[in-house]
Image (spheres, rainbow, N blue to C red):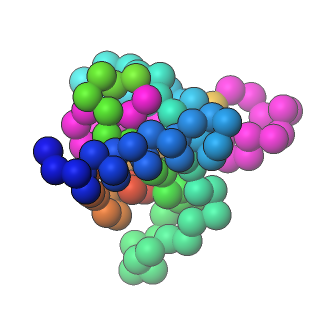
Amino acid sequence: MGLMDEAMQSDARFSMDTDQFGESITYTRADGTEYTITVVVDRNAPTRDQEYPRPGRVFDVQIAYDVDNTLGLATPPARGDQIAVKDDPSDASLPGNPNKQFIGMVSADSGGWLVQFG
């Protein structure tokens, strides 16, 4: 791993800190394996491809690369994965955390992945 890779991973871990921009979520792999990780959720993300409209909201989610699966994930998100996250985290009246399904990868680098869930 090069110096740039280490810097990108360090920056990603800093951004995911819950004292900064991150929030803890439950991430469930397609095989049922669950992780509690910290991610940055953009709840105002526009749908990128208007040809394929989706009901409900589409979120951009920044996930850090983390070999231990504690702060982020050791392997890229994939089809069948889902996250449990509220549409509006400040609304205490909303019950539970509805599951959002993995839609696709927006970008990836050595610091992590930007993916869409909806």
Residue 87 position (above or below residue 107): above
Q: Where residue 50 appears, x then y in whole percent?
A: 45, 80
Q: Residue furthest bottom?
A: 51
72 and 92: which is toward the camera: 72
Q: Residue furthest front?
A: 3
Q: Is residue 85 visible?
A: no
Q: Where residue 84 appears, x then y in whole percent?
A: 54, 33
Q: Is residue 110 visible?
A: yes
89 and 97: which is toward the camera: 89
Residue 89 shown in magenta: yes
Q: Residue at x 64, y 64 (%)?
A: 44
The segment highlighted magenta reads 71-96
Q: Quadrant of residue 25?
A: top right
Q: Quadrant of the N terminus?
A: top left
Residue 19 position (above or below residue 57): above
Residue 41 position (above or below residue 27): below
45 and 71: which is toward the camera: 71
- Looking at the magenta stretch, what is its main secondary structure? loop
Q: Residue at x 44, y 74 (%)?
A: 48
Residue 48 shown in magenta: no
Q: How many marks?
A: 0
Q: Quadrant of residue 51?
A: bottom left
Q: Where residue 4 appears, x then y in whole percent?
A: 25, 56
Q: Residue furthest left?
A: 1
Q: Residue at x 43, y 29 (%)?
A: 71
Q: Where residue 103 appears, x then y in whole percent?
A: 37, 54
Q: Residue at x 53, y 56 (%)?
A: 59
